[in-house]
Amino acid sequence: MAELSPLLAARWSPHAFDPSVGLTDGEAASLLEAARWAPSAGNRQPWRFLLGRRADEAYKRLFVHLAAENQRWAGQASALLLGAYLLPATPTVAARTPASPAPAAHGSGQAAHDLEQPGYDRARATYDQAQAVYDLGQAVAHLTVQAGAIGLHVHQMTGFDRAGLAVDLALPDDVRPHVVVAIGRLGDPLSLPGDLRRRETELRHRHPVTDLLLGLSPG
């Protein structure tokens, strides 16, 4: 096997968390700082987070919208973190600063003219929803590695009622919930229901690298 950072090699997604341990302020700050420094297209940083710690109101509101399968185990986590992304603004007018109005249209040369304007933000004009989701994923990945560095584990979940949660939290229309992350220290697998207990102790499987590489079609 190729050499791998110990932090990445030790990363996995447990179901069993220690219900007696809380998330400290320092740990929370460390995780969010790691997410904050993730790369993003045009440095747009579209990620938005809501952190709930066990028994507080945010935790309860996140938990109630989890899929039933996830509610079986996630309630033991020290914290639940909502990861959302900021929906990109519609290009054209939104791609300009207020101080630089769009010039009048003048045929096929319009696009080239736009790119010459000092107020034109190329990154924002070409930024789309798929890139925002990708960038949120990078931020959560950074958070995940940082969690391992400070002795924590995370389990990411997309099984939750996104629409219901958005309404419950009164999120702005341009903020889209995408993932809920359970955070905590490892617990006892024996505390889990039988099927989850078996999954907790099974060997992890990954496809070989050769299965992941794309080849070129004949030219």
Image (spheres, grey):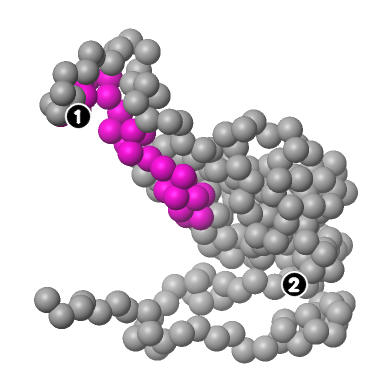
Q: Quadrant of residue 33?
A: top right
Q: Residue at x 42, y 37 (%)?
A: 44
Q: Is residue 168 above or below residue 195?
A: above
Horizontally, residue 187 falls left or right of residue 113, namely right
Q: Is residue 98 visible?
A: yes
Decide whether the magenta segment is chiefly helix, strand or loop.
helix
The residue tagged 1 is 111
* Element marked by disc 1: helix
* Magenta extent: 112-138
Q: Nearer the viewer, residue 29 or 200?
A: 200
Horizontally, residue 109 falls left or right of residue 168, namely left
The image's mark for residue 84 is none
Q: Nearer the viewer, residue 117 or 23?
A: 117
Q: Residue at x 62, y 32 (%)?
A: 173
Q: Nearer the viewer, residue 119 or 200?
A: 119
Q: Nearer the viewer, mark 1 or mark 2?
A: 1
Was residue 137 drawn as part of the magenta stretch in this picture? yes
The image's mark for residue 15 is 2
Horizontally, residue 117 falls left or right of residue 169, namely left
Q: Quadrant of the N terminus?
A: bottom left
Circle nearer the N terminus (1, 2): 2
